Image (cartoon, grey):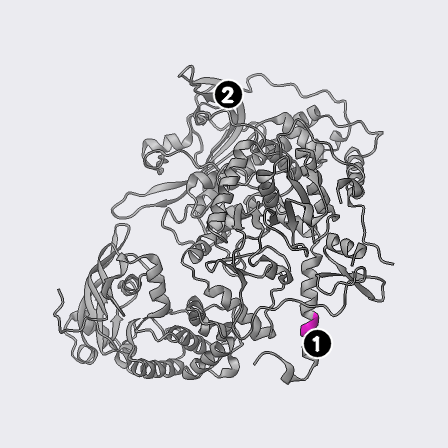
Amino acid sequence: MMDFDAKPPLMRVQNLSCAYGSRTVVRDISFDLWPGEVLAIVGESGSGKTTLLNAVAARHTPSDGHVSFDLRDHGLQEIYGMSEAQRRMLARTDWGFVHQNAADGLRMNVSAGANVSERLMALGQRNYGQLRAQAIDWLERVEISPSRIDDRPHTFSGGMRQRLQIARNLITQPRLVFMDEPTSGLDVSVQAKLLDMMRTLTRQMNLAAIIVTHDLAVARLLAQRMMVMQNGQAVETGLTDQVLDDPQHPYTQLLVSSVLQP
Amino acid sequence: MTQNDMVESVPLRDPHINFAYLDERTKRMIRRAILKAVAVPGYQVPFGSREMPLPYGWGTGGIQVTASIIGESDVLKVIDQGSDDTVNAVNIRRFFQRTTGVEVTTDTTAASIIQTRHRIPETPLREGQVIVYQVPVPEPMQRLEPREEETRKLHALQEYGLMHVNLFEDLAHYGHISSTYDYPVLVNGRYIMSPSPIPKFDNPKMHLNPALQLFGAGREKRIYAVPPYTTVESLGFDDHPFEVQRWQSACELCGSKESFLDEVIMDDQGKKMFVCSDSDYCSKRQVSP
Amino acid sequence: MYVAVKGGETAILNSYELLAQQRRGDPDVPELSVAQIRQQLRLSVDRVMTEGSVYDPDLAALAIKQSAGDLVEAIFLLRAYRATLPRLGYTQPLDTAGMQISRRISAAFKDLPGGQVLGPTYDYTQRLLDFSLLATGKPAPVARKGQVNNEATPRVVDLLNHESLLEGQLPEEGDPDPFDLTRQPLRFPANRSARLQNLARADEGFLLAMAYSTQRGYSESHPFVGEIRFGTVDVCIVPEELGFEISVGDVPVTECQMINQFQGSQTQPPQFTRGYGLAFGHSERKAMAMALVDRALRADELGEAVTAPAQMQEFVLSHSDSLESSGFVQHLKLPHYVDFQSELELVRKMRQSHAMPKDDHDAE
């Protein structure tokens, strides 16, 4: 029962577990996420972080536990108690999902403009001129030249595709964005630019985000809070700076110490 | 105009074959599918399509629908590309003559059932008539999303963004919407439907039509329907609305400026002539313009 | 003056005559009989029965004669005929363990109860044209004594099951009636019963290509031929009036059991997985291809990632029926000039606006 005066978290995860057959890959994870808060989930490959992300983003049904989201008019609702129609609507409007591989989050065979304005069309916008204008606006915000609006994503560089993916997701002003290794596979300098842009956007839009990454620098730059995962469990959670500067858990200490200094 | 004016040899009713070829149980199954379709305008009802003596892709869906509703007192017209005399129309009409013995006609106004491929007759239809369309691809989103499992969900959840993405793309690349036939429509404000490969010129005829419109896809095993006086709106954008085709010439034979015209190449210099696609409409106008 | 072309009716009737002439060929050459086709083109007959979904060698032979040897056309004829037949009842499942074996091999074992029976097979022939077959009138080969194998020949899958090495093939919970592909439209995801029916009548060429793709890295299941057996099996029914099983005849079938990649984990002991193929008559290529594709389509069920076309239900099962594929591909021969006219008109219009100055162009 909520405290009458307290604002609810944007998302509440309780005792979440995920299994593939007899293998448990996510074990009893709980956390709250607040509006405008960025949480980084950090771990090596095999830690279960991607499965966890997919479970909270309604893309993989957990074997145990609860995931609740604060719907605009209805308060905290369990994601897996909703109808599929409601979940899909949520995924198209109030949520965003940025994939590691941009090709998974874009329609590669339609233009950048169509990619960016699809969500608006799905919500019923029917004025081509206005849709195009909004697409141009968003391309500019993610630093893609509007002259590329009619080009298809396979003519774009990796960094550009990621920025396009972000624009496609943010055009409906979602309150929560999930990101799965958003900068992996990109050149270091491209990564830096992208991270900078993401930081600006999340702050401008008061965006909450859950970012899965193996890269501590990404966590440091973008996230206020961070959760370290090992073998499906959260071994350490706390403010990013604190965890990175003063790691308590031996595994976290190992992670932090093994980061190569530039 | 009756059958005698038109064909040389009238196929006789074959007594060894059940009326309209299909067995009565199959007809009932198809009629149940039709009733479901009429109850939910534009929704594709799956049905147990039968192998027919014509190949899948050649009108078996339309034939099964017609075969399930036709009765001894019906008058049947069969057209393809708007004409009663194309080989495909002739073939299908002969099939029904052989299996039912019903009266056939080329006169749109005299027919109670019109089976058609790729055109709606120019002469307006009236209450009590049934028009049966042959449909190759019932799923309007198939080219964008081939998986039926996914398109079924999109229809159920009314998630039609994909269709508009397609139109957006056309405008971005060509400045025009590039679908000129099989142009998708919104039926009764709910389901997006493929009207079959009729030219978009014919789309407006579907809207609030007094006749019953039935659609049969044999190979893909779907039946759908637009009941009389149902709204049928062609998709578009507010600032780029749906437009029909217009010709600069009139029909060479009857002078009509309103009908859909076929292009006929006259010589090897590329000289061309335009003639009405709807043969019944054209010949009537020639007799009394 | 232009007169619209008429005479579609006459053209059709003339085409029937020309077709009959083409089918008959040179009238001085003796006419092919249905009996000859049934006896001497039996592998064609087997294929037509399998894909036509009717066991009737005479009708299949007739269809082959009528279609002048175009097997896809013959299959269509038989399938269309089948659609007019009433259903009288259901047989019991075929007991292939009790098969009268003509041929039985296993690649998985060197020797096994019942032995390796080579039987009639092209496998070890040399593919050299035998010109002696140009002449007719040679005495027919004499059937050798002892060709019928009377030894008990248990199925390899049953042998492996003694040690539980092979996954069991149990009916679904509640033992529901099988799906009926001839009566219900296929919807996705399709259960195994529906998939197997679809594969049984699938076009052999398509199935073969799909199966081949699984051996070349487009999904990989490490297949072994557990067993191929060809012979006759009893067809049994349980008439209501009698309440017990009676045999109504026998049919020759070819059955293939593929043994595939084992699955298991630390908690579950590993077992081999299976693929199954069945066809009328002597149709090894078909049965083997079917077994490989059956296994590939079980990817979802077995928790494997779906990455290759042969694993995608919608891709395989929607394109496997030769009636559908041949019909739709060939339907392009039908008049499409109304739709083409619409395209012409649009392209001409767009070309015109290209030729005009830019500010007349619609797009931003």
Task: Give the residue at mark 2.
Answer: C149
Residue at image position (64%, 42%) is: B55
Rendering coords of residue B27 (x, y %): 54, 36
- Residue closest to the far top: C242
- Identify the secondary structure beneath mark 1: helix
Can you say which quadrant of the picture contains the N terminus of chain B? top right
Residue A233 drawn above or below residue C35: below
Q: Which residues are magenta?
A: C348-352
Identify the chain of the residue marked 1, using the numbered disc in the image: C
Q: How many marks?
A: 2
Residue C171 vs residue B115, the one in the foreground: B115
Of marks 1 and 2, the one in the foreground: 1
**Is residue C124 visible from the viewing direction of this image?**
no
Residue at image position (14%, 73%) is: A6
State the predominant SS element of the stretch in magenta.
Answer: helix
C6 relative position to B221: left or right: right
Residue at image position (25%, 54%) is: A63
Rendering coords of residue B107 (x, y %): 72, 48
